[in-house]
Structures are given as structure tokens and as C-alpha cells.
Image (spheres, rainbow, N blue to C red):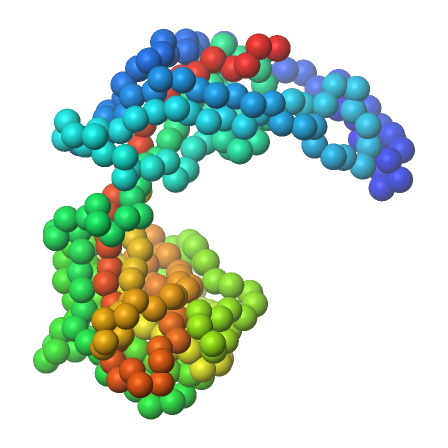
Amino acid sequence: MRVFDRNAQQVAEFDVPFPDTSSTPEWTPDPLPVTKTDTDVRVTFSAVDMQEQPPLKLAFPLDHPRRGWRITPVFSVERNGVSAPEWKSDTTTLTDALGNTGYSWDCRLSPHERAWKLEMQLSRDDPAAFGPDEIWESPLIPLPAVDSSQSVHSEDSPATAKVQQVTVTLQAIGRGATTYKDFATSKDTVTQRMSASSRMPGNKKYTVSHSSSSRNNGPTIHTLTVFGESVHLLLKLEHLPKGHREFFRVHDDQGRELPHYVESLTMKDAYYGFIFVDPADDVQSLRVTAYVHTARTVELLVAPPAH
């Protein structure tokens, strides 16, 4: 291992012993074609294309730069015995027997291994590919006054349903600048997917600011502040299974679909999605549709490219 300073000058060199690999599993590549199954989905791999990538651009020279490849599995999908091209790859990772991980768009694992494990997750994004038991559509929700929000779900007027064992609830709707104070609490790791800059789902911009606080080792309390003029809907999805997927569509009271952005927080098995839209001036109410399903995962042992 060589160490370089900021001026690309080598300042140290170390010999690092290779770890004990006596307990490392011995993987053998699967012969192709081969079929892998996850519950009701069967994936048949016919080939795995490997295109070498250019070396990484570094500030210092390497005698033997690590090679990289773009990995593209070639496959077909069936569901319940019927061709299902609507199931598409959305995440593909590669792992070697030592536990190192690479990604399909630029895998830089060692080609000296006997095999790599390719893990591919498949999901759907075509509304026409979902059955009635995978869809929930809210009633029309009146728009609130400018720079305010109001609750949608209540015991007297529930806006909730169970879809694929996931509880979907439309909790609130807002318009313009407002704050969702203490909308969620958590004790677990939070995955935040929120834009750091302004976005424009139509003609109006919005920005969001997420803050959290905790006292005396208690639960973390989350608050979201919205700036701008866009309309926003808060959906909560609970009891998420591993590999859960969701996406949404929003229509106005005249049946027109509206472009939207989603800002979200995920806490263990709960998901909070803020959906931002910009309805026309003549719109009085909105309807949101949630599509819920679970991704399928298959694994394939592949031979690394020749070295």
C-alpha cells in the first residue's frame, strides 16, 4: 500500500498481509442459461454482458490501476407461468466471497476470484401492471387555504386502507408555506430522501427543511417546514416488508394527472412521503393513488472477466 500527499508525492509504503481465507466459501459460476425463482417470479438468465470501463482518474499514478466493468445481465421474466416484462431490474449489486461489494454500472471487484455473486432486485413502475389488491385511491380532498395545512385522516372520516399488508394513510394536505410540526417520532435509523435545493413540479417552486430533536435519550421528533406555493400531501405507509416498493399518482378534480415530486423519510418499517404538485387555478380538490408491492430478489453466481 502506497501513501501519497496532496502534491501526488509518495510519502510511505507498507506491505499489508493478505487475510486468512481458509473459511471463505468456494463459489462456482452458475451455467447459463439458468432460472432463478423468488416466490411467484421466475427469472431466466441467458447471458451476462461485461464491458470494461476506463480506469478511474486519480491525482497520482498507479502501476496497476484497478480494472472495472459494467455488468449487464440478459434475462427474461415470468410471473405465475406467464411472461412478465413489466418486472424490471431496479438494483443490481455484486459481491465476492470475501464480502467486498461492487455495483453493476462500475464493478471493480478482483477478477482473480472464481465467481462473483450477482444480486438483482426486480420491481414494477407501470400502473397498468398492478392488480386491485395493490392499489389504494383516496377520495377527493379539498385544497386548504393558502399557507396552511389540515388533517385528512380522522376516526369520523378515515382516509386509510391496507394494501399488501401495508397500511396506507393520507394524513394531511397543505398549500404554500406551512410546517408539519412533530409529524413523526422514531427510535431507529432514518433514511432521508429530500432535495437540498428548490424544485418546481409545475409553475411554482418549493423547498423543504427537515429538523429533528430528542431529549434525555427519548425518541427523535421530526418536523418539516415547507416554503413556496406548491400544494403538498402527506402519506404514511406502515408495516413495510423487506424489499417494499411504492409510487404515487395525483389527479385533480377534473381527472387530469399532475406531475409531482416526493420528499420522504423512512424509519424502520414506516415511510412518510410528502408529495408536491402544482394544480391549476380552477382546481378545488385532489386525489392521490398509491401503488404498493414488494420487490423480488434473485441471485446468480457469475464468472469474472478474464484477467
The residue that appears at 47% across and 78% down in the rendered structure is 204
Left or right for 243, reference 210: left
* Front-most of residues 185 and 166: 166
Vertical position of residue 146 compared to residue 74: above or below: below
Tell whether 136 sits left or right of 172.
left
Q: In front: 110, or 99?
A: 110
Query: For the image shown, how many numbered marks are present on the structure?
Result: 0
The reply to whether residue 177 is visible in this rendering is yes
137, 18: nearer the viewer: 137
Residue 60 drawn at (x, y percent): 82, 32
Point 52% across, 15% down: residue: 304
Instruction: Please provide percent x and percent y for residue 25.
Output: 43, 13
Q: Position of residue 39 (x, y in %)?
A: 19, 31
Asked which quadrant contains residue 229, the reply is bottom left
Residue 213 in view (yes/no): no
| Residue drawn 35% across the image and 17% down it | 46
Residue 9 lies, in percent from the top left, at 89, 33
In this rendering, would 215 be left or right of 232?
A: right
Res. 162 image quadrant:
bottom left
Q: Quadrant where the N terminus lies?
A: top right
